[in-house]
Image (spheres, rainbow, N blue to C red):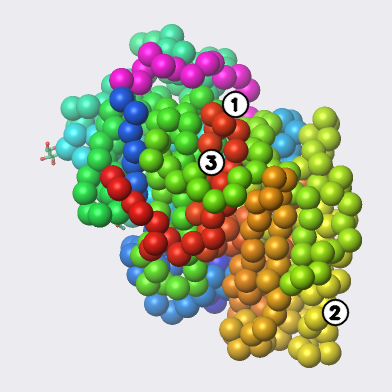
Amino acid sequence: MAMAALSASHIKPLGLFFFTLVAFAPFPTTTSTNPRKTIITKLIHPNSVFSPYHNPKVTTTSSSLNNASTHSLKSSLASKARGIPYVPNDIRAGIIAEATGTQFMVNISIGDPPKPQLLTMDTGSNLFWIQCLPCIKCFEQKYPIFDPSNSSTYTNLPCTSPSCTVSSRDKCDPSYNCKFSFKYLDGTAVSGIMGTERLKFETSDEGIISVSNVVFGCAHDNDGYSGETSGILGLGPSSISLVTQIGFKFSYCIGNIKDPKYSHNNLILGDGAKLEGDSTPLEVFNELYYLTLEGISVGEKRLEIDPNIFKREASGKGGVVIDSGTTVSFLAEAGYVPLSNEVQSLLNGKLERVQDPANPALCYKGIIDRDLTGFPVVTFHFAGGAELALDINSMFEENGEDEFCMAIHQSGLDELSVIGIMAQQSYNIGYDLGGNKIFFQRIDCELLELAS
Ligand SMILES: *[C@@H]1O[C@H](CO)[C@@H](O)[C@H](O)[C@H]1NC(C)=O
Ligand SMILES: *[C@@H]1O[C@H](CO)[C@@H](O)[C@H](O)[C@H]1NC(C)=O
Ligand SMILES: *[C@@H]1O[C@H](CO)[C@@H](O)[C@H](O)[C@H]1NC(C)=O
């Protein structure tokens, strides 16, 4: 049963495509009165003991992939990569019902008096939105729905503001407030009024930091969403994102997702972001973060993969995106096949292969921590020398009681490769949007020196 409940966990909220997100104004310096700041906050995994969604019966990140969800992930990211609308006709699942999946949540208090809201962190999308009263239609969420009329720090964003860019047409309501609306892949539509508010984050040392005049979406009419968080914290590169509002830098550190008691996952926004370790060039296309992957090793063995197969073409086909909102990773076929063959050559004959036509992943009978001890580290090599090393718990995921699968799947449409959050475990990942670099540092997040 747990598996069924978790089956949507490979789907990122914003693999979901914004129909209306087409044009962006320059960074709205006029609306930001904040001096440069550093915000350090905890990241909460839904299955951790720190989450209100914690279910002690669910002990791992196990999830089985259903065909519909695989399809939607690939389709949506690929169409987003090309900047073309993807109109789904076969996706009915609650695609952004991710609270029980493998995405991380941030606890942000909003307004005055401050009201806590849990938001899903997503580097694959840009807008920060929460549900707001009055609701034309709202989904259920854990904390009470935010009431802007009861907050002394809330203001509506005028539709003449340079930050009013989410909807390109029909963006003024009769009072000249900025309207926004967008549609997700599964048919979910979110709409409301853009506003500005004061945010309060609980820092990792139990302190509080506040930021004023943050532009966000107050969503009053939310049809189809069945998530449990209050909304989405988009950390993409566009001018509407909290990242560009706070300082063009951020970092997050993720430990072992399987450890429900691990309390050191964190997100840092602004000048204090940890940009440490080896770096690799970061490029932005269609609001997604692209990296240059040059090769893959299994142990000491470098696989025979032509690095050109990971290059992004001018058409938008191919390329390698890093995304905190995708669970497993995806590789273009010419990268996936050699990796899958190498894993099979190491495991076939030792463990029993499980083949399920409904599950495209490479799966075996067994238990990761028991049967894969000694399995070599798999390393992704990026331009400039940065690396991501995947140990067994980054490389494989449990799939039920006595089965595990490779947490890297073959990319479907358009040969787009995606580095998902499982592959980012045990790393601090730093994004420098000004310097166009991303930093990978293998570290126990507990050892990061966090000064807030
Ligand atoms: C979120 O923050 C509020 C206010 O500080 C706190 O009461 C609540 O317990 C926090 N929730 C989680 C899940 O950490
Ligand atoms: C509005 O805020 C006040 C505190 O300032 C609180 O006492 C009251 O319950 C709030 N009303 C609603 C509807 O949330
Ligand atoms: C997945 O595919 C299998 C076989 O193609 C089919 O029987 C099953 O119903 C599909 N599952 C979903 C969730 O679409």
Mark 1 residue type: Leu
For the residue pair 393 and 356, the one nearer the viewer reads as 393
Mark 3 residue type: Tyr
x then y, percent, for residue 116: 27, 47
On whether residue 30 falls in the magenta region, the answer is: yes
Q: Residue at x 69, y 45 (%)?
A: 384
Question: Is 288 located above or below residue 212 in the figure?
Answer: below
**Number of other residues with Cα within 10 Å of mark 1, as a class: few under 14, some 14 to 19, many 20 or more:** some
Q: Residue at x 66, y 39 (%)?
A: 281
Q: Secondary structure at mark 2?
A: helix
Note whether ligand 3 is within 8 Å of mark 2: no
The residue singled out by tag 1 in the image is 21
Q: Secondary structure at mark 3?
A: strand
Q: Is the N terminus in the top left, top right, bottom left or bottom right quadrant?
A: bottom right
- Which of marks 3 and 2 precedes in the sequence? 2
Question: Is 214 located above or below residue 388 in the figure?
Answer: above
Q: Residue at x 52, y 63 (%)?
A: 426
Give the residues in magenta: 18-33
**Magenta highlight: main SS:** loop
On whether residue 287 falls in the magenta region, the answer is: no
The residue singled out by tag 3 in the image is 431
Question: Alpha-carbon distance for marks 2 and 3?
Answer: 36 Å
Question: Alpha-carbon distance for marks 2 and 1?
Answer: 45 Å
Residue 77 in sight from this viewpoint: no
CB atoms at circles 2 and 3 under 8 Å apart?
no
Between disc 2 and disc 1, the foreground one is 2
Mark 2 residue type: Ser
CB atoms at circles 2 and 1 under 8 Å apart?
no
- Which of marks 1 and 3 precedes in the sequence? 1
The residue singled out by tag 2 in the image is 345
Question: Alpha-carbon distance for marks 3 and 1?
Answer: 23 Å
